Each structure stands twice: as structure tokens, then as C-alpha cells.
Image: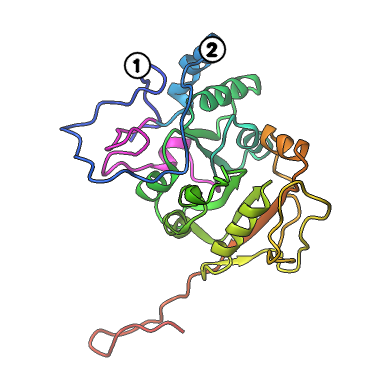
Amino acid sequence: MTPASTPSSPGSAPSSPGPKPAQTHRDVVSFVRRGERLSQGRQNAWDRLSPTYVIDPPRGHRDTLPAKGSRLDLEQVFGRRAELVVEVGSGTGDNIVAAALSHPERDHLGVEVYLPGLAQTLSRVEREGCPPNLRMLPLDAQGALPAMLPEESIDQLWVYFADPWPKQRHHKRRLINPPFLDAVLPLLADGAAFRLATDWAQYAHHMRSHLDVRSELALLHPDGPAPSGISSDAIPPNIPSTGWAPRFEGRVKTGFENKGRAAGRLIWDLAYTRVPRRPVTDWAPGIGAPTAP
């Protein structure tokens, strides 16, 4: 597929061949899109830069999913094959644009479904001189990334300040849940870093409960202490006291973090590494199935 095509208007999806398949159930997603209108300045930025920076594949049964068979050729998109950093929920682009500028040797992919956030990212890109090693994907990460990227293609995966969905009945909509992990962990290269941050203690505990049990992951800072200080939100009494990461120096302080700190909440950082896959030993046909050491 080509790196990007020009949509007729922001947020409009390319026409897909044939009728859309009937939906038999309502998909559970981790996001809600509100207020898709753009200011004139952001509209202008979108018109100028989206053909270069926004990847626009044919859509599937939702406009945030790629059509069946859509693939992302990273070498074609970036004009090379380099280390790939993916940020899920890149918001207004603070982190992903800063990372692209600071690390021209890497390629960076921001995944964001919120149109005003994408347009603001493009404005930021333009102000910073249009780094060539950045692209945006306006799709649902859980459905799009495993469909479009090959396994072991991501060298760093970032999820910063995802919606905590604090109400119990909404916990199924939290991004860090088994379906998302099942989708993205095969995409991590051996030794890849998986970095997360939140300002909600309950969500930090939730993330630990789902991430620590994954055999594909190992904590990068098993002895790292929990953040210190008094928090305005309730800290679960059984939250782990160790295993927390120091603030990643490559993480820009965003508006989400500032709001959390202003509200008196602590910042919880996590970092994991993708455990190397176990190699399969050589075997001869007819002698038995291959065995792992």
C-alpha cells in the first residue's frame, strides 16, 4: 500500500470495495470520539500534511479498522527499515514528535483515532520542521496493528495515560486488557521495550495484574519502588510495592500528566521487555515433532 492518500475531508474514510459486512455484535473499544470539527488552522495543517504523514488504508466494517488484507509496508512508508517505535494513543503528538526529532535514526508511528488530536499533531510536525521519520495511523490499535504489521516488527511500544475508565462497568473498555495484549505482544521484537504510564493508582494496579502474569514479558525494573508521596486518589492496599519504573527520560510531560499532578495524583511508570522467543531445535521428518529446549 502507498504511505498515504488524500482523503476528501478530515475523518472521511476511503470507499471500500463491496458492501460492508453485517455487524452481529457491538465491538468493545477503549475510546470515545467526540467533537471531530477542526479549527481553520488545524484544517489547513491537515490539508497540507495529511497526504504525507497520515496513513490512510481502505476501511473495514468500522472506519477505525483496516479492510481485510490491508498491510503496512514499513520500508515503503519510511523509505528504509529502521528501529520502529509505536505509540498507542499519541494524542496531540507531544511524545511522538519529540521522539522523532530526538532520534532521527528510528522510525516512529503514532496511533490515534481522535481527529483533532491528529490535526494538532500535524501542526506540531510543521512547527518542528517536518521530520521525515514519523507517520500517523488513524485506526484502532487493537484491531489494526496485528492486521497490518508483521510479528516482531516493533522495537518499542508506548502507552501513556490511556483512559482509565474508572467505573467498574467500564473496566472492559480499558486498553490494557487481555484482547489488546494478545494482539500486540506478538508484534514486539525480542528484547523490545513496552513502556506505560498512568496517573490513576487503580489503573496502575489493573495494569500490573494483567502485565505481570504474561509469560512474554519481564519487568525491566523488578526492584523499582512505587512512587512516593500522598495521592488524592485511593491507592489499592495490595498494589505491588516494587516493580515500578523510573520516569522514562524520553517521555515528554503532557497535558494529561499535568492535569493528574494538579489533581494531586501520583504518576505510575511501568517498563517491560519482550522475553526472547524460545528457539525450536532442528529435527528430521519422521523422527518426531520438534521440541523446544
Q: How is the image coloured?
A: rainbow
Residue at left offset 39%, top offset 42%: 73
**Left or right of 123 on screen, residue 238:** right
Foreground: 288 or 166? 166
Q: Is residue 169 magenta?
A: no
Whole-percent x, y for residue 95 in the image: 64, 37
- Residue 282 visible in the snapshot: yes
Q: Residues within 10 Å of mark 1 (few under 14, many from 20)?
A: few
Residue 108 in the image: above or below residue 237: above
Residue 124 in the image: above or below residue 74: above
**Left or right of 136 on screen, residue 286:** left
Foreground: 26 or 141? 26
The residue where tag 1 is placed is: 8
Whole-percent x, y for residue 284 in the image: 29, 85
Which quarter of the image is occupied by the N terminus? top left
Instruction: Tell me the element at label 2.
Output: loop
- Magenta residues span 56-85
The residue where tag 2 is placed is: 39
Whole-number angstrom distance, CA of label 2 to CA of label 1: 17 Å
- The kind of residue tagged 1 is Ser
Report if the CB atoms under discs 2 and 1 are less than 8 Å apart.
no
Q: Is residue 71 magenta?
A: yes
**Left or right of 90 on screen, residue 268:** right
Residue at left offset 37%, top offset 82%: 282
Residue 20 in the image: above or below residue 145: above
